[in-house]
Amino acid sequence: MKNRVKIFDTTLRDGEQAPGCSMNLKEKLEVAKRLELLKVDIIEAGFAISSPGDFESVSAVAETVKDCSVASLARCAEKDIDAAYEALKKAESPRIHIFIATSPIHMEYKLKMSPDEVLEKAAAMVRYAKKLCPDVEFSAEDATRSDPKFLSEIVRTVIKNGANVVNIPDTVGYSTPNEMRSIIEQVIKNVPECEDIELSVHCHNDLGMATANSLSGILGGASQVECTVNGLGERAGNAPLEEIVMALRTRPDIYNADTRIDSTKIYSTSKAVFGIIGRTAPLNKPIVGANAFSHEAGIHQHGVLANRETYEIMTPESVGVSSNSMVLGKHSGKHAFNDALKQLGYTLNKDDLGDCFKRFKVLCDKKKTVSIKDIEALVRNITPEESKHYTLKSYSVHIGHPESATAVITLEKDGKIFKEVSLGNGPVDAAFRAVDKITNPPKYSFENYVIQSVSEGKDSLGEVMTTLRTADRVFTGRGLSTDVIEASIEAYVHTQNKLLDSFRQKEGADCDA
Ligand code: KIV
Ligand code: ZN
């Protein structure tokens, strides 16, 4: 019998708090739905007290997700715990996750508290949380740099006061695999009460050892792993979910442990999360990078053709990378299209399905073959109706050398047509300048422009992501077309819509206050 390891996903909390990874409410809900389909056990949806936006997203995820527990982070303070409890009220299975630092450096310089005060605070706040919620997790922040005796003492204390999950974080990514295993083994040895609770690890990747440390924690006796999709997270990130899940599944002989994750949803979830933050996977990223399953060297290709296992330790299909190149064509109806989406793991509402199907038909006229990758890109690029303040009606660009490029852009908003022309340093710059003249956005800096082909071939769809930064937030929009200028303008208009949305909400909130 394999041991069951629970996956606690913190993409929406630890991942989202990393610079350049912020998401709006809709995006967080999309990620939460995908995590539910992926079958993670717990979704940490945010840090409810940290902002009204976080409170709202924890509430919305709690209300939407049915098949996973939903957690909110809280410091060891009654007001934090109250906010977490309030935000989780509609969750089928809520969890309050409270933390306090236990290392000498954090206690002295950050908390300015003695170890006894920390111990007392942790006990009191776990007791307080337990009265509100049956599922209480306690994290000893910076556990791996804590005095081992003190760590065991606080673990014993919080269990006694009601914590049913205790997490041992390697907050600054300082630990090593041997040490991590030994820390978990020591805690279990010193605190036999750990038998009755879930012991968890949460490893950061500062020295590139987050996956190895998490797996060593499992070997030491941890039964929960905290991780994020694509390893997003503070600084160098958290342990990537996809690596932990596939290491356990590929090496049962070593770990004798498994999760309930549906690994065939890993690739699409990874793509969706990268798409939302406007990034793409590095080519050689394990499991989800474009080269993860490609065999370039002749000797490797020869081996794989003779027997896949010569160079393949897991199949691309097992993580949802499909080798199926063409699924649908020009004559496919909405039914067949919807069936294909379902097989890929997507369930769209009526409006999104209609929108997607329309774009699919347009694509069939432009492209000889429509692949699974194209269909996934169409789904990834659905723009919610309410975010369409401005929509692109038409554009024309003129480029030449040595003169500047010229763009004429026509956008529509609330039935009104706006047209502007601009010169620029190339067609994309000219088009973006013309869009700015229409939307008149608040002050921003242009952070990032990413362009990638969705599939192989010269007629491939181009997917563009543009990211803008304001004083306190970043906004990413996406566009998709076989014409990369059109995809660029769509991405930019989408980003501008999100920026305008957020400023309007802020102005509304300021007026309400
Ligand atoms: O890294 C860390 O210590 C954390 C805790 C809040 C669990 O994210
Ligand atoms: Zn963390």
Image (cartoon, grey):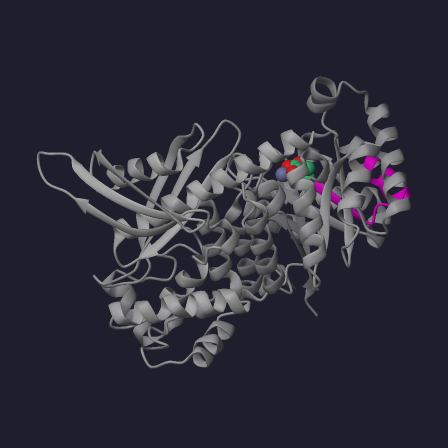
Q: State the residue at coordinates (47%, 61%).
A: 268
Residues drawn in magenta = 154-169
Q: State the residue at coordinates (44%, 65%).
A: 355
Can you see residue 459? Answer: yes
36 displayed left or right of 199: left
Between 488 and 83, the one nearer to me in the picture: 488
Q: How many numbered discs?
A: 0
Residue 182 horizontal/vertical position (percent): 68, 42
Asked where in the image residue 316 lies, by quadrant, the reply is: bottom left
413 displayed left or right of 33: left
Q: State the residue at coordinates (80%, 45%).
A: 85
Q: Quick check: 437 above or below 274?
A: above
Residue 428 horizontal/vertical position (percent): 26, 41
Q: Quick check: 173 above or below 133?
A: above
Asked where in the image residue 7 lies, by quadrant, the reply is: bottom right
Q: Is residue 157 magenta?
A: yes
Q: State the residue at coordinates (21%, 61%).
A: 458
Image quarter for ligand 1: top right
- The quarter in which the C terminus is drawn is top right
- The quarter in which the N terminus is drawn is bottom right
